[in-house]
Image (cartoon, grey):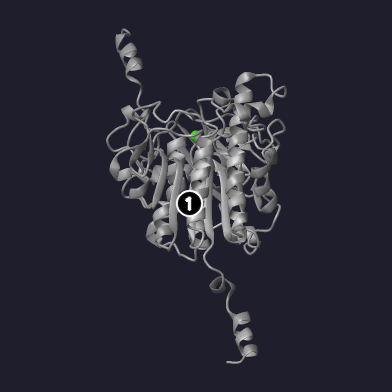
């Protein structure tokens, strides 16, 4: 073959075969509200690195998670399936009270295993919240490396603050930790450095900005004289630290010229618990633990230079369940029918190849609460009769139209009932702490 022939063969080779598999980086914030980032209208707390993802890729206006609460939402994220389809409906309560079988059910296959099967080196750095027992450990679910904690929350500064919920490197307890936000990001960056030559999957679920409100002085100092309320100031410092952590990941990718070949996503695991950590969900109604938009619609950003047009604002509803099929597709894999996925590959929608919508309907169930989105409409029950909202004209869910739109209300309610038939009873319920239980028992019947 002469040089000219060789070049023409090169030119004819399909792009996907010529390019190596992309790296995949999934960064998750904890309890971050819809309005907390600059790219979502936040004005008080600069988040330049997170906002750069929106500039270099896509910002989803209607990005959802599958539950307004930490553990179930992660079960959906890790499987691409509505977690209520396999009974993972609730948090387990504190570590020392978690039931024996608490964890991502062993019948389910997690995202890192799917990507490992496609040739990826997989690392996780941060909050798991999908099981404490050895069989549920991240390294039993597909992660090659793990640094973080297994519970739902952790001190940012004291590795041994909760004996039932230590910090682990692999399966070894770690006695000291830097500010967790800094360390989780640094550990993830180190993993990227060590694995830059092969396709890697990084899962970086920060505990920021979940309670407790704890920040280092250097981050607090950024808001000296700017934010008066001390809790809000600490929250700002925590978010600013997380933004730095995201910046470290972006810089590490850039340093090794990996940015173009890396699909990177950031989203929050549920809406902000506004009273708990001063987060903001404006203009949405409600907060963490509610199926109002404020509990389930979250900041949601994605970049993959060259594959997703820069500065895209995508308005059709998407859900974190879509990330597993999106990543598998990016990795040139194909989900089997028996994976029973509820999420869809978003890439054709983002490139403009598919002009349709990823989802005609989305569903939620969380105890007595449930909701369904159908196009611009949302039907929602907080336990009683459902209310109907037209989100396009009423994003704040203020005008219940269920009585004037009774046919639609009935139809959507029936669709939700159909979906609900595929849900299993909850495998566990949130446990009360023993002190509360005792108090209850003392009350006269
Ligand atoms: Ca959370």
**Extreme bottom residue here?**
1
Q: Is residue 285 left or right of residue 323?
A: right
Q: Is mark 1 within 8 Å of ligand 1?
A: no
In the image, residue 117 above or below residue 362: below
In the image, residue 184 above or below residue 2: above
Image quadrant assignment for residue 49 = top right
Residue closest to the eye, 234 or 369: 234
Residue closest to the eye, 207 or 444: 207
Q: Is residue 65 in view from this perspective?
A: no
Image quadrant assignment for residue 100 = top left
**Extreme left residue here?**
100
Q: Under tag 1, what secondary structure?
A: helix
Tell me the residue that label 1 is attached to: 191
| Residue at 59 percent of width and 84 percent of height | 9
Q: Is residue 251 left or right of residue 203?
A: right
Report the number of discs.
Answer: 1
Q: Residues within 10 Å of mark 1 (few under 14, many from 20)?
A: many
* Image quadrant in which the N terminus is located: bottom right
* Image quadrant in which the C terminus is located: top left
Q: Is residue 97 left or right of residue 29?
A: left
Q: Is residue 114 in view from this perspective?
A: yes
Q: Residue 418: x, y in percent?
A: 44, 46
| Residue at 29 percent of width and 45 percent of height | 135
Q: Residue 51: x, y in percent?
A: 67, 44
Q: Residue 401: x, y in percent?
A: 62, 33
Q: Residue 55: x, y in percent?
A: 70, 50
In the image, residue 51 above or below residue 437: below
């Amino acid at each position: 073959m002469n040089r000219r022939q060789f070049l023409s063969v090169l030119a004819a080779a399909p792009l996907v075969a010529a390019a190596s598999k992309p790296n995949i980086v999934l960064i998750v914030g904890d309890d971050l509200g819809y309005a907390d980032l600059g790219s979502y209208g936040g004005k008080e707390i600069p988040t330049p690195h997170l906002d750069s993802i929106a500039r270099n890729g896509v910002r989803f206006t209607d990005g959802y998670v599958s539950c307004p609460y930490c553990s179930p939402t992660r079960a959906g994220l890790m499987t691409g399936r509505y977690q209520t389809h396999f009974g993972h409906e609730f948090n387990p309560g504190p570590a020392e009270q978690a039931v024996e079988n608490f964890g991502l059910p062993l019948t389910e296959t997690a995202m890192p295993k799917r990507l490992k099967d496609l040739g990826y080196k997989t690392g996780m750095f941060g909050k798991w919240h999908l099981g404490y027992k050895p069989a549920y450990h991240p390294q039993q679910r597909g992660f090659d490396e793990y640094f973080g904690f297994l519970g739902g929350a952790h001190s940012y500064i004291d590795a041994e603050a909760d004996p039932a919920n230590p910090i682990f490197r692999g399966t070894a307890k770690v006695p000291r930790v830097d500010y967790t936000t800094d360390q989780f990001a640094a550990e993830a960056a180190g993993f990227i450095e060590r694995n830059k030559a092969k396709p890697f999957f990084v899962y970086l679920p920060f505990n920021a900005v979940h309670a407790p409100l704890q920040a280092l002085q250097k981050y607090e100092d950024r808001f000296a004289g700017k934010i008066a309320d001390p809790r809000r100031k600490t929250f700002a410092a925590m978010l600013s630290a997380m933004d730095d952590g995201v910046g470290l990941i972006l810089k590490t990718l850039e340093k090794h010229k990996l940015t173009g070949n890396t699909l990177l996503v950031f989203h929050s695991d549920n809406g902000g618990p506004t009273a708990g950590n001063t987060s903001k969900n404006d203009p949405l109604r409600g907060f963490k633990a509610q199926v109002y938009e404020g509990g389930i619609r979250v900041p949601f950003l994605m970049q993959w230079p060259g594959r997703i047009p820069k500065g895209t604002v995508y308005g059709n509803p998407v859900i974190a369940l879509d990330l597993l099929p999106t990543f598998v597709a990016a990795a040139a894999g194909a989900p089997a029918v028996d994976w029973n996925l509820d999420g869809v590959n978003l890439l054709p929608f983002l490139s403009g190849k598919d002009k349709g919508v990823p989802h005609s309907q989305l569903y939620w169930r969380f105890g007595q609460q449930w909701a369904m989105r159908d196009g611009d409409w949302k039907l929602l029950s907080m336990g009683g009769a459902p209310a109907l909202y037209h989100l396009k004209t009423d994003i704040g869910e203020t005008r219940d139209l269920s009585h004037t739109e009774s046919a639609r209300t009935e139809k959507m309610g029936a669709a939700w009932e159909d979906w609900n038939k595929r849900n299993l009873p909850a495998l566990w319920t949130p446990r009360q702490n023993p002190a509360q239980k005792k108090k209850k028992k003392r009350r006269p019947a």
